Amino acid sequence: MCSKIYSYGNLTLAMIIVGSSVVFGKVITHSFPVFLASGLRFAIASVIMLPILLKSEEKLFKVSKKDIVYLVSMAFCGQFVFTVLVLFGLRYTSAIEAGIITSTSPAMMVAVNYLLFRERPGVIPIFAVLLVVIGIISINGFLNLDRVTIASSHIFGNLLMIGAVLGEAFFLLMRKRISADISNLALTGYLCFLGFIIFLPLSIYQGISFDFYSVSSVAWMSILYFGAVFTVLAYILWFQGVSKVSGNTAGVFTAVMPVSAVVLSCLFLKERFILDHAFGGVLILLAIFLITMNPKKNE
């Protein structure tokens, strides 16, 4: 049971960090071109990971062809698709709408989990997912129709966010396809390096004409956070947790992500905490309680 609690804690912390990306992403998109920001993010992450891996991993360069295919697939879904679509999406849609769309993460993961692993969700996971979706919709104010923005200018951004959620679902569950011989630390390093390689050509292209001196210290700190915390720490925490639980259980914990986004928006963007947020938070906590208290049927 202690190992399960440890896994749940890792999943929760990982999603809290991922949720914070909405807040820091807003700062980054106003200061950096998207591909340059992504290249800097993975450059920082790679610099952090390389000495750690060289010191701790003896079989760093011994990866099977099958795992290479899965690693590239993970990097494409998580590094390229999720990062690019989120950063571009945040330029066109509001933080509230972005939060509403990320509320589909648990349901998306259950669907992707069935498609990839044929893992049928039981009654408890399905009920928990419903609670999660309703809870996050409430947190983002969608139950109050007066606050819903349906302006055509946001449609494109919303579609990008939906694509980002789909890419994230594939990325988060693909860990189960990777060989257990590859440690979570090594996996994080591989993904950081692949992300850097993917974005290198476009980031160089945008960086040639970019005025780096115009970037504020807050924006530089946000890039550093994206590379060190969001990319390295969150990945390690998630991979440690997801390797010990079922895909459906992991899907429920993605609900923490938009909750984190709302709370951090209140703290850093000075948005107001309202009753909708409290109601949604209670439903999400109930969903997590149900799924974690029924491990035998869902793990």
Image: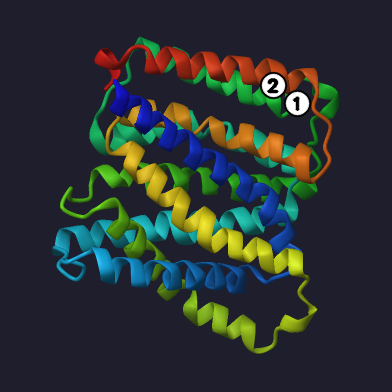
Q: How far apart are marks 2 and 1 (CA)?
A: 5 Å
Residue 216 visible? The answer is yes
Quadrant in the picture for residue 33? bottom right
Element under disc 2: helix
- From the top left corner, tell me how far across and down residue 71 is, in percent: 29, 59
User: On residue 141, which mark appears?
Assistant: 1
Q: Residues within 10 Å of mark 1 (few under 14, many from 20)?
A: many
Is 65 situated above or below 109?
A: below
Q: Residue at x 66, y 25 (%)?
A: 137
The C terminus lies in which quarter of the figure? top left
User: On residue 138, which mark appears?
Assistant: 2
Left or right side of 131 for 50: left
The N terminus lies in which quarter of the figure? top left
Left or right side of 12 for 291: left
Quadrant in the picture for residue 88? bottom right
Q: Are marks 2 and 1 in contact (CB under 8 Å)?
A: yes
Give the total of numbered labels. Answer: 2
Residue 84 visible? The answer is no
- From the top left corner, tell me how far across and down residue 113 is, in percent: 33, 34
Q: Residues within 10 Å of mark 2 (few under 14, many from 20)?
A: many
> Which is more toward the observer, 193 or 54?
54
Q: Which residue is drawn at 84% across and 41% down?
A: 270
Element under disc 1: loop
Callout 1 amino acid: Gly
User: On residue 45, which mark appears?
Assistant: none
- From the top left corner, tell me how far across and down residue 248 is, in percent: 36, 27
- From the top left corner, tell me how far across and down residue 202 is, in percent: 54, 78
Callout 2 amino acid: Ser
Is 218 situated above or below 299?
A: below
Q: By what rule are the colours in the image chosen?
A: rainbow
